[in-house]
Image (tube, coloured by chain):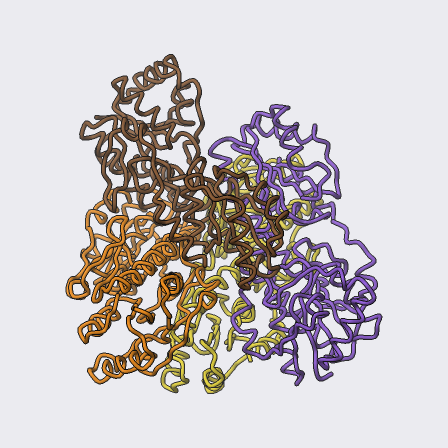
Chain colours: A brown, B purple, C orange, D yellow
Amino acid sequence: MKHIGVLTSGGDSPGMNACIRAVVRTGLDLGMEVTGIRRGYAGLIAGEMEPMDARSVGGIIQRAGTILQTSRCEEFKTLAGRREALRKLNEYGIEGLVVIGGDGSLRGALELHRMGFPTIGVPASIDNDIWGTDMAIGTDTALNTALDAIDKIKETASSHGRAFLVEVMGRNRGYLALMTGIAGGAEVVLIPEKEMPLERVAEILEQAYIKGKAHALVVIAEGAKYKTSEVAAYLQREEVGFEVRTTILGHVQRGGAPSAFDRLLATRMGVAAVQQLAQGASGVMVGLVGNRIETIGLEEVTKRSKGLDLAFYDMAEVLAK
Amino acid sequence: MKHIGVLTSGGDSPGMNACIRAVVRTGLDLGMEVTGIRRGYAGLIAGEMEPMDARSVGGIIQRAGTILQTSRCEEFKTLAGRREALRKLNEYGIEGLVVIGGDGSLRGALELHRMGFPTIGVPASIDNDIWGTDMAIGTDTALNTALDAIDKIKETASSHGRAFLVEVMGRNRGYLALMTGIAGGAEVVLIPEKEMPLERVAEILEQAYIKGKAHALVVIAEGAKYKTSEVAAYLQREEVGFEVRTTILGHVQRGGAPSAFDRLLATRMGVAAVQQLAQGASGVMVGLVGNRIETIGLEEVTKRSKGLDLAFYDMAEVLAK
Amino acid sequence: MKHIGVLTSGGDSPGMNACIRAVVRTGLDLGMEVTGIRRGYAGLIAGEMEPMDARSVGGIIQRAGTILQTSRCEEFKTLAGRREALRKLNEYGIEGLVVIGGDGSLRGALELHRMGFPTIGVPASIDNDIWGTDMAIGTDTALNTALDAIDKIKETASSHGRAFLVEVMGRNRGYLALMTGIAGGAEVVLIPEKEMPLERVAEILEQAYIKGKAHALVVIAEGAKYKTSEVAAYLQREEVGFEVRTTILGHVQRGGAPSAFDRLLATRMGVAAVQQLAQGASGVMVGLVGNRIETIGLEEVTKRSKGLDLAFYDMAEVLAK
Amino acid sequence: MKHIGVLTSGGDSPGMNACIRAVVRTGLDLGMEVTGIRRGYAGLIAGEMEPMDARSVGGIIQRAGTILQTSRCEEFKTLAGRREALRKLNEYGIEGLVVIGGDGSLRGALELHRMGFPTIGVPASIDNDIWGTDMAIGTDTALNTALDAIDKIKETASSHGRAFLVEVMGRNRGYLALMTGIAGGAEVVLIPEKEMPLERVAEILEQAYIKGKAHALVVIAEGAKYKTSEVAAYLQREEVGFEVRTTILGHVQRGGAPSAFDRLLATRMGVAAVQQLAQGASGVMVGLVGNRIETIGLEEVTKRSKGLDLAFYDMAEVLAK
């Protein structure tokens, strides 16, 4: 393999740049040419290519976002779109591709592999919802960003004796909310994977109030059964003792200098992805299993649904007391 | 004066603790007894007093919020409530009071002064909306917190080529939004003090898109004419080129370790407030004027409305180009 | 087991408080009494005990350091000292002990176990030098703190075209330096586990200068063969192109709000340690293996020496090009 | 004036980029051409010019350092060097110059003015040692960075019951040390402007130890009479109760995203500098006086020496008790 391409696709997550850097420099070290493809599959179809050298990825390891930019692309979901993509890869002489992104992006990578094009996936998602890797690129940074916001909110909450509802990202998964809740010392965590009736939420807050806690914290996953506004309305109606306030953290969670963990993970995954291509692999994703980088078939990755270890949920309950 | 009290009231703002510390240690240094009054005027009426010594304010200078807690108090707005407050001050032998808080809190301080009780006000508000001081305690920290969030949002915005609407606090004033907008490099700032039609907002974003900017940023004051959701809906309808996303920063802006500026300002104001009491002053607020701490009558403070220097607004427009 | 004690010992590391909190609340949840022992083994011998309830560990999960304080204790290394410690544990009716600390502290825990006292170790060390756990409490936060400093230094380095030597902690191990070096994009990493001649360092920097890099970064472990000042003197003499500057990060690396990773790790380990005591275990340490918490004999922990995976070192070299 | 140049010179300070951005965009708005001159006076002499447009200063407002880079230049101190600089300015058709930098850089600006070339100075220095401005660009950020480090150090200091000596920058001035000391709650501050005998330092720490303080903090200006190592050796010899540790913050203080204050100050100064050139001014510096931007002759700026208000020093002493 003499020439590889790299693209980022889907929602951006902190550490993507560290991964691009690792792909480029590992490729160059192995004597390959490396082409950066802009704006994910959309840019691939449009032929937005730029040759990368060691300098073009200098000074980016500490930046969130992706210098290659990203997009969601409907056209690539059609056969015609994918055919056009292949044509462009051939036109530029690219012989292998590294796709950095989430669920949908990896499904795209699998399609290219099925069409015979050597493709390796790298999991990047602040939601940590990808089967086959203990952690995806960006999750650790998003956790820290959410936690930093929660630490700030707790200070004002204590001063007023308030209960705060804080909504964090995670799409239809509760990983981010649950881990943020444990690390932030939340009284209640509401996640899609485990339903809690609103009466129970009110009861816990009321107990916290009676025990004399200075504030209370409820972390709500964006995909939880009850919308944050519903929870707020219910708690206000029930008069749990604390005044209730709401904050939706939003896109802040995608930004911020990537954490050490994410830079290291992204770097290791980028290196491994290129090594896989060099060894002739295709149709696999590199994932973190324990503390090793391993490969797993994209077929399996895209079919299976990553669960949440609910032992953590029980732990959160005990520790909130 | 042998015995003073100190309370924090209204919305909390970072630096209040640094001010409490300065009041306590300056009082002790002048040979006074110092009593901390919990939960603002509500705690004053309820007699929630605790004697303060040098140690009781150790390790708090770097913490947001207020160790004395705070509240909003309806009862104090009645004559009966204020009479009860006076009674409590006398009961505990307190001869002078330092009130740290915003607009409403300072109005309360003025009332106590009018009833003959020596009272000094200290301006604390993340909104910087208090007449008689260039900066209130907490504004600088809130600015930095909002800015940090905006820096994060810009990274993800660039990766996707998006326009972000970011709503910041400020009640019915635009100071926080305007300064955050300038320091954050916003394309548009929407504030109560200066109306901009939505067509103009759309036009600016469209121009930015055409010029090839990687993203666009609109900072919206919570008190601006159009609600953030209205602006978002309008821009989506108008198709300005960028996809539009919204973030409401919320109560995060009240937290975070106070900045150097706020710790120094709060410290200087706390020292000055006690010195004023020691010199027999009452009914005044200590304020920052240029780089000096001066006093100004609470009468004037509570009557006048602080404007916004719109030269900054014009500057923002030039710099966004 | 009806009554357990908990102490922190040796150098402090961020996350110790989160672990104390987990120990206390898990103990209470299991119906145990929990006693906090101040200042490590020194306080144990001196009988500095305080009963802990759920509130006494409220609001500490986000604080670095340890509310129980810590110390190094020579007396405990003597038989007389340990006998006195046992006497105190019995005097207070404590039936099991959780020891949170590094190498030396765990050796102390092993001694207590050998004397028949049920004792569980929890690994806490910013150096990540403890056998039997992939990560110790505090390492991830220290990494992030060092990285944050390096990001700042790179900005000024770029503006001046300078080479910076940054010394990080780690005692006689290179983990912190190597991981910081990779995540910070260092040109060279000097660690105890792998010697690099100074001529080679000079050569690499000179190459970087010739290639036109805006700055160069050398991360040096405090335990590396050449002292930072020696390296600086050598590079200045050799005139590598860049001007050379030095920064020793120092104790800053022990502070800072613990990262999400460390709060979660510390929490899980604290819970597991108490569960071990409840199940009658003793003489073991709880460790992170892959992504599970497992136990390992303190005998083995204190005898074996944790190595460094030098594949990371090779990776750092490739990526720095 | 149709064409202006801008350069940064001397030590870099956070906010320089915000100032460059303001100069460029204000110049363009006034219909001027704007040329960026790289590496300060050295690059001016060498003719390292690049035309700037609105995009070339996009995305830099939040970055420390200077995209134009900086240097110290011996050649410019000679008449021949300055003559060469003038020649280059004429060669490129530049009619006016904005110089962003510290003391020495402003002296250079004065020389150019004296040679008849329209030149405006902008004060940038983390030491805040420039006459004619209340604050220089970068000082507020450096203060916050030093403070953040001190907050971290205090956490570990408390856990061990230690006294920490922290050396901060400031060249031969104590501004940074004194303000950091007040905002950080230091027991002692050692600055060039006010001598304190080492016996007194030992006495204060001993008193703090006896009073039961959990830790003690001594902030030392790099220009103070006694070197930090001397102070440490003395205190260790005197056995003040606390164990003593030392940290030298170093170049970290020059990095970090500029604070809101510095971005706003830099922006206002950049705008004002170009307006001054447009109005035909030369030989002046723009400075912050109270809360207004004013001009002051470079003659006066470079002759006068900025003092330190020692009332702050006395305040620090009272508050440390």
User: How many marks are shown on the rendered structure?
Assistant: 0
Image vertical order of residue B230 relative to residue C80, above or below: above
Residue D291 in the image, given as x and y percentages of width and height:
70, 57
Residue reaching furthest to the top: A80
Q: Taking the image as drawn, is residue A208 in sight? A: yes
Q: Quadrant of the N terminus of chain B?
A: bottom right
Judging depth in this view, the residue of C36 and D293 nearest the camera is C36
Instruction: Residue at 42%, 36% (x, y): give it.
Output: A66
Instruction: Residue at 69%, 75% (x, y): give it.
Output: B5
Image vertical order of residue A267 relative to residue A154, above or below: above
Q: Taking the image as drawn, is residue D91 in sight? A: no
Find residue D249 and report its image quarter.
bottom left
Q: Is residue B75 left or right of residue A321?
A: right
Residue B66 in the image, given as x and y percentages of width and height:
60, 64
Find residue C79 and report its image quarter.
bottom left
Find residue D34 and report its image quarter.
top right
Judging depth in this view, the residue of B69 and B244 nearest the camera is B69
Residue C62 in the image, given as x and y percentages of width and height:
45, 59
Image vertical order of residue A114 relative to residue C13, above or below: above
Q: Quadrant of the C terminus of chain B?
A: top right
Residue C65 in the image, given as x and y percentages of width and height:
40, 67
Q: Is residue C256 left or right of residue C227?
A: right
Judging depth in this view, the residue of A247 and D54 nearest the camera is A247
Image vertical order of residue A24 relative to residue C277, above or below: above
